[in-house]
């Protein structure tokens, strides 16, 4: 199983680019790297531990013993709230082109709800307070021909890509002196749409790192010299991985599928580079229309590909009182953010 979140590239980016406090822990006989998160309230400091990309063994008794071990080793330290794990065991995977019916989505929702009930009951873990990583992922086999990839898209997506081509949209890799423009354009969009982006210093370190290590690029789609969409991608092994991106909100470009076109051309470019898969990272779990990533997922699924549904995010509670207070804090924070958007 490919595991980006325990890969040397991902850990290197976390350590060197984002300078996150890291730690190591042995889980189920394998060494994992994780991140230490901290929060200050006055003179007090609270922290929790996050490990992404954990594979659970089939032996549920072994899992229960590991949960108890973590609670014992980390729970006796002052200020420790929880130990978060993103579990990447695949619940199921399927081709998006063949699974778009309402009944399938309802069945998938019920399957996930049943899995959650079973896992939390059997292991005494809790469903995470906050979703550290998406519960689903979309991957495209880009070794296929352009015609095959177009045929796997839904009809609306296919038409948008063709429309962009008719409008003489072009594709290229951004030059280094255009990197700042990417950030400023994304910053303006974030302000208008009420979403957060990484600080400029972290962004600068990221693009410098991927350029210096030849493990990523910034891509551009444009029409008549005007940029209509951007994307940052990184490369790991045989995959190109979508990191972030956006399309212009100018009215004259809204109905031509700028982002669809850019992704289609990234598939083409990556295939020429010898890569075989494009990993679009997060999507909403199938059947959960209320999920905050539902519209993002809808866009990615429209491009075809394979959707992988993971077990998801679960917490090991280290301090029940602090955990409850943290849960209340997250709830009120989320409520206030929703009010601001309205």
Image: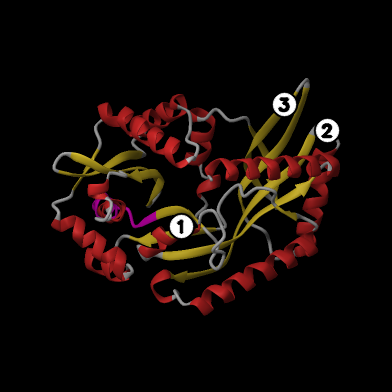
The residue to which callout 1 is attached is: 295
Kind of element beneath mark 1 = helix
Per the model, the C-alpha gap separating discs 2 and 1 is 41 Å
Q: Is residue 297 above or below residue 38?
A: below
Circle 2: element type: loop
Rendered view: 145 above or below 190? below
Q: Which residue is mark 3?
A: 40
Q: Residue at x 48, y 33 (%)?
A: 198
Q: Is residue 297 left or right of residue 108?
A: left
Residue 218 found in image quarter? top left
The residue range painted magenta reads 266-278
Mark 2 or 1, nearer chain start:
2
Decide: marks 2, 1 in contact (CB < 8 A)? Answer: no
Characterize the local packing of mark 2: few (<14), some (14-19) or many (20 or more) Cα atoms within 10 angstroms.
few
Expressed as whole percent of the image width and height from the top left, the position of residue 301 reads 41, 63
Instruction: Tell me which residue sits at (65%, 47%) in the image.
Output: 130
The residue to which callout 2 is attached is 77
Asked if residue 315 is among those painted magenta in the image, a careful observer would answer no
Q: Residues within 10 Å of mark 3 (few under 14, many from 20)?
A: few
Q: Position of residue 160 (x, y in %)?
A: 25, 61
User: Which percent across, then down, holds residue 254?
Assistant: 28, 51
């Amino acid at each position: 199983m490919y595991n980006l979140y325990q890969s040397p590239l991902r850990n290197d980016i976390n350590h060197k680019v984002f300078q996150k406090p890291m730690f190591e822990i042995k889980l189920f006989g394998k060494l994992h790297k994780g991140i230490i998160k901290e929060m200050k309230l006055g003179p007090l400091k609270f922290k929790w531990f996050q490990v992404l990309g954990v594979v659970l063994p089939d032996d549920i008794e072994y899992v229960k013993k590991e949960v108890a071990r973590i609670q014992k080793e980390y729970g006796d330290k002052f200020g420790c709230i929880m130990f978060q794990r993103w579990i990447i065991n695949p619940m199921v995977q399927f081709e998006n082109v063949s699974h778009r019916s309402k009944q399938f989505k309802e069945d998938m929702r019920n399957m996930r709800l049943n899995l959650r009930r079973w896992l939390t009951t059997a292991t005494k873990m809790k469903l995470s307070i906050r979703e550290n990583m998406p519960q689903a992922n979309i991957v495209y086999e880009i070794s296929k021909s352009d015609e095959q990839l177009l045929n796997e898209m839904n009809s609306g997506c296919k038409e948008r890509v063709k429309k962009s081509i008719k409008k003489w949209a072009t594709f290229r890799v951004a030059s280094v002196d255009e990197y700042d423009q990417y950030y400023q354009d994304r910053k303006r969009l974030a302000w208008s749409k009420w979403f957060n982006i990484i600080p400029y210093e972290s962004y600068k370190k990221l693009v410098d790192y991927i350029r210096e290590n030849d493990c990523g690029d910034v891509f551009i789609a444009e029409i008549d010299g005007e940029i209509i969409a951007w994307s940052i991608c990184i490369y790991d092994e045989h995959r190109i991985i979508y990191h972030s991106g956006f399309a212009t909100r100018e009215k004259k470009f809204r109905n031509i599928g700028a982002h669809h076109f850019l992704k289609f051309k990234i598939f083409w470019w990556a295939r020429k580079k010898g890569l075989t898969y494009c990993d679009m990272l997060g999507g909403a779990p199938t059947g959960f229309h209320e999920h905050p990533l539902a519209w993002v997922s809808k866009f990615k699924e429209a491009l075809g590909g394979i959707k992988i549904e993971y077990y998801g995010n679960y917490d090991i509670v280290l301090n029940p009182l602090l955990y409850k207070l943290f849960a209340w804090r997250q709830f009120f924070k989320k409520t206030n953010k929703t009010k601001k958007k309205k």
